[in-house]
Amino acid sequence: MTRIAQAFKKNKKALIVFIMAGDPSLARTEQLVYQIEAAGADIIELGIPFSDSIADGITIQAAANRSLKKGTDAADAIKLAKKIRKRSQIPLIFMTSFNILMSYGTAKFVKDAASAGIDGLIIPDLPVDEADTIKKNGLDLIFLVSPNSSDEHIRLIAKKSSGFVYAVSIAGITGARKNLHLQINTAVRKIKKLTKTPIAIGFGISNPKQAAEASKLADGVIVGSAVIDVIAKKPKQVGKFVSSLKKAIS
């Protein structure tokens, strides 16, 4: 059983936290992983910065830009994962653009990421029907379903996604929102009929109340922009904020 599968099996609801590798520094990112894990996160997504992301909102774009200004690249993220894996067995997922993989060399990237201890990949701009072109080296390949996805697209994602299905709660880019998109209820119900793969809801979840709401629908909750905001503005509150999210979904 993979580390991602174990995380969902041992938790009633899994908390997945996204942070940007290299923001504010690679050394700080490493420490944040341990801090976030200690606060209750079950899975951590590490973003590899890309200057032209299609799905990131202002907060994550700003984090990516800060990281890029420090010179962070895919090789740095892989080295970071290797260092983390020496101290922690928390499931780690890379989230980045397919352009990053192609620039690095797709087959080499996947092989190096797996060797470093990465458990899965989220590549928002990778067409789901091209999933089989990536030799996964044991990594889970996680795809996104949006509220306005067609039935055909949902069926394909349910078939191809492994680890979990990433259900996007809003029609748009990442970022904190006041309310979750009601259409996600319909999408999640459709996914559940098609696969036993866990479902995690992300995009727009910014506080414990919204996390609790999302956890009633799915097997896991993903929080990114709200955590990055805390890292940037109130770094000493990161552990407390993550703990509040975990408590809300438990």
Image (tube, rainbow, N blue to C red):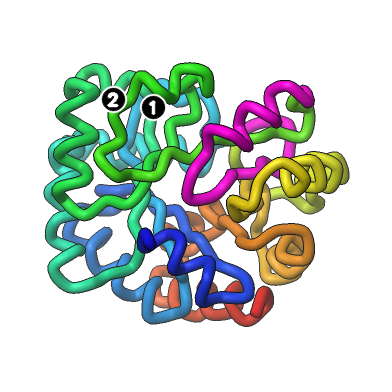
Q: CA distance from mark 1 to mark 2?
A: 6 Å
Pick the residue in front: 163 or 28.
163
Q: Does the magenta segment cover residue 116?
A: no
Marking on residue 97:
1
Q: Is residue 124 above or below residue 139?
A: above
Task: Name the spot of residue 214 as percent of width and height, x first.
Answer: 74, 60
Asked which quadrant contains residue 97, the reply is top left
Q: Which residues are magenta?
A: 150-173
Q: Is residue 147 left or right of residue 26?
A: right
Pick the residue in front: 141 or 70.
141
Task: Name the spot of residue 242 as percent of width and height, x first.
Answer: 51, 73
Disc 2 marks which amino acid?
Ile
Q: Marks 2 and 1: in contact by CB < 8 Å?
A: yes
Q: Which residue is mark 2?
A: 100
Q: Is residue 21 left or right of residue 145?
A: left
Q: Is residue 122 above or below residue 36?
A: above
